[in-house]
Each structure stands twice: as C-alpha cells, then as structure tokens.
Amino acid sequence: MRGRGVWVAALVAVLAGTGGCGLVSAGAEHGRAGGRAPAEAESASEPAAQSGVRGRVMRVQGAPGSHCPLQARASSPSAPRLPEAAVVSDSRGRYSWSLPEATYTLSARCGAAEGSVQGVEVVAGRVVRADIVVE
C-alpha cells in the first residue's frame, strides 16, 4: 500500500497548490501515526514573536476536513505544557495553533476518519506548516 500513500501525498500537494512538495506524510495513508512529514517555515511575513503550526485537514478524496478536532503530543516528556488541549479546523479544513517550541505529533479526527503527522518541529519565532490527511 506504499504506492497509495505516495498517490495521496501527490493528490494533496496538487489540491494544496504546493506542486508536489506537500507536507503530507505517506505513512499517514491509513490515518495512523508512523509517517514523518517535514515541516517548512511559512513566509518571512509571519510575525517574529509567534511560533506554532498551521495547515489543513483534508480527506483522501480532497474534501476539506471541516470542524475536526486536532491534538498535539510533544515527543519529549519535558516539553512545555500546551496552551490548549485541542484546536478545531474551520469549514475549509484550515487550522492554526500557537505552540511552544518542541517536536510534535499532530492528529486529527473527522468523525470515524483519523490521520496524523509526526516530526512537526516548532521553533521559537516561526510558524511551520503541517497538513493532515484523514482516512
């Protein structure tokens, strides 16, 4: 099923307009942790004092993951406490979350569909992008 994960990543990249450089993890093809997606910094126009993550929750078919709760779990037990227990995607599947500096696994649940992305590294003063496909 590895080829299916690549197809999903390519589909999401096209839909997100990233031209094949999307951040969707092929390992998240079945909505389970295990994939690793690189996080890339947003543009330099982001406020320097803000740090966190933003992205989209999408279904495999390309539809937005509307009003889906997301959770973040830091990789290190010594990571700072999270400001919120969860955030919820908007009607277009977009989310934004101010998070302290750490490496996270982000997960989303849209009804029975689940997905996650691992290795999202939040650096102080930067906003990184991480998209999640739920299946």
Image (cartoon, rainbow, N blue to C red):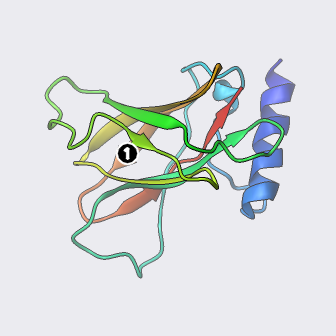
Q: Which residue is mark 1?
A: 121
Which is nearer the eye, 134 or 18?
A: 134
Q: Please, is residue 60 above or below residue 15 in the view? A: above
Which is nearer the eye, 58 or 14?
A: 58
Q: Please, is residue 22 above or below residue 1 in the view? A: below
Q: Please, is residue 113 above or below residue 120 in the view? A: above
**Residue at x 80%, y 22% (from the top left corner):** 2
Image quarter where the N terminus lies is top right
Q: Position of residue 47 (x, y in %)?
A: 31, 76
Q: Position of residue 132 (x, y in %)?
A: 60, 39
Location of residue 111 by image quarter: top right
Q: Position of residue 21 (x, y in %)?
A: 70, 56
Q: Amino acid at mark 1?
A: Glu
Which is nearer the eye, 131 or 41?
A: 131
**Residue at x 62%, y 48% (from the top left corner):** 23
**Residue at x 85%, y 37% (from the top left corner):** 7
Image quarter where the C terminus lies is top right
Location of residue 104 by image quarter: top left
- Kind of element beneath mark 1: strand
